[in-house]
Every structure is written in C-alpha cells, then in structure tokens.
Image (cartoon, helix red, strand yellow):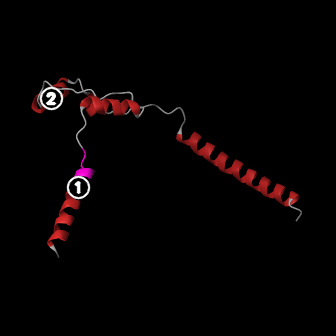
Amino acid sequence: MKSTQIIAVTLLSLVSAVAVAETAPTQAARDAANVSARNNYPVVTYQSTKTRAEVVAELEQAQKDGLIVNNNSYPVLKTASSKTRADVKKEAQQDVIREAKESSAQKMNKSLHSGA
C-alpha cells in the first residue's frame, strides 16, 4: 500500500469515529428528552444516607420483631368448605349427565336440519 492510502484510511477512520461518538447529555437535556417523549416524570436523583449493611441490619431486626410477616408474601387463609365430598361428587355426575344430554340434543338437531 502506498503511504497516501494508509493516511487516507487513517483519516477516514478518525473522522468516522468522531461522527459516531456521542456526548454525555446533561441532566437538563435528559429531563427535556423525557418530557418530549411523553414521559412526564423527570429523573429524580436520590442519595441514600444508609449503607447496605445498615439496611440489612434493619431488615433482620424487623423480621425478629415480627413486623415483616411471612417474608413479604401474603399468608394462605384457610376457609372451610360449605359442601361435603358427596355433594361435590353428585354435582360432577349431574354435570356429566347434563353435558351428555346437550351433546346428544345438538347432534339430533344437526341431523334434523342438515338435510340428511
């Protein structure tokens, strides 16, 4: 390769790198972009006053004191059933019989009106 080609390739790569590079937007520019994108909630910066260890210690203390029940999930509430097992079985059998009757009625209706 000639030296002019090497210089040309180097210059092109530098120019393309500059063209592609982004500058870091300021906080105001980010907020303006959020608002223009219909995201009406600007980013609110927050500086924590506690360390991670302090937060974990508070969590463990709250768990020991019983303030956090069942590890932040809802407990299962037991409810008594109003039906006996026999009632449920009887209902299931009645449903099967009803569905069989409806199915046979639909088949009969279809055969009557299908022209067969």
Rendering quarter of residue 49: top left
Residue at image x 16%, y 26%? 48
Along the horizontal axis of the image, is 69 left or right of 79? left
Residue at image x 20%, y 70%? 5
Which quadrant, please, contains the C terminus? bottom right
Looking at numbered disc 1 in the image, what kind of residue is underneath it?
Val
Which residue in the protein does label 2 denote?
55
Which quadrant, please, contains the N terminus? bottom left
Q: Nearer the viewer, residue 68 or 18?
A: 18
Looking at numbered disc 2 in the image, what kind of residue is underneath it?
Val
Residue at image x 42%, y 32%? 38
The magenta span reads 18-22
Rendering quarter of residue 27: top left
Q: Position of residue 87 (x, y in %)?
A: 58, 40
Q: Earlier in the sequence, mark 1 or mark 2?
A: 1
Residue 75 at least partly seen: no
Residue at image x 66%, y 50%? 96
